[in-house]
Amino acid sequence: MLNIKNLKSGYSGSEVIHGVNLTIKPGEIVALIGPNGAGKSTVLKSIFGLAEVYGGQIFFKDRDITHLQTHELIGLGISYVPQGRQIFPNMTVLENLQMGAFVTKDQDIVETNIKDVFQKFPALQEKHRELASTLSGGQQQILAIARALIQNPQLLLLDEPSLGLSPKIVREIFEKIIKIKNEGVAILMVEQNARQAVGVAERTYILESGIVVLEGDKNILNNKKIEDIYFGGEIAMQAI
């Protein structure tokens, strides 16, 4: 589904990612974790055309997408949910979803996709006429994910979906993520909640200073290297 080879990328000529290799198979969740400033979000932005790529290649279904524009990537089946629930607060829930379909010209398809999203997320249908700003933090995150699903993506990029949410809401968000994966959507997820992310992912990559330092399955948190490489010792281990 996605194959990243020796990716070097960053912003304004400053390299943040230094030769990352990463793969995602169809219909699986892959987690990308690591300390703050490791470059995790930059990997997602590099895939989605929001960061500068200085070297390496990004392949989506065997097609080189390294330097494609964001709207072209959406058309190919890639969607992105940025960090911080960047919804349109002064628009209704329905209008937010319609904004997610801006590259689709056929309004019948748009309406069908919105109906499908409402079936997945009934709470949004109940509040479809309400302003997005009136939703709870968890509902806003669900709206951000739902808006990304309007295009029926084959690959979903999620940046910190649990950020700022209560443990109860985090569990609900991750349940939604698993359901999306079970419907055949591959997911690359950046997440600070390491235990939660590794628990739902088929594979996990640990990024440090723009380099992948470890890759593994659900047992990766048992690796003794984690304490020094990512979690920073006993205090950080307690934090997760």
Image: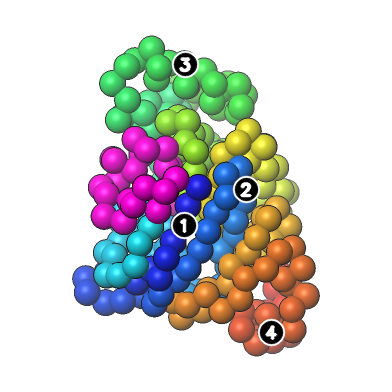
- Give the residues drawn in magenta, as a range: 59-82
Confirm whether residue 172 shows in the render.
no
Q: Which residue is mark 4?
A: 225
Front: mark 4 or 1: 1
Residue type beneath disc 4: Lys
Q: Earlier in the sequence, mark 2 or mark 4?
A: 2
Residue 134 vs residue 77, the one in the foreground? 77
Q: Earlier in the sequence, mark 3 or mark 2?
A: 2
Q: Which residue is mark 1?
A: 3
Q: Between marks 3 and 2, how big is the CA–CA gap?
A: 25 Å
Q: Earlier in the sequence, mark 4 or mark 1?
A: 1
Q: Which residue is mark 2?
A: 28
Q: Which image quarter is the C terminus in?
A: bottom right
Residue 152 image label: none
Q: Earlier in the sequence, mark 1 or mark 3?
A: 1
Residue type beneath disc 3: Thr
Q: Position of residue 103 (x, y in %)?
A: 30, 30
Who's the residue at 61% across and 43% down the image? Answer: 27
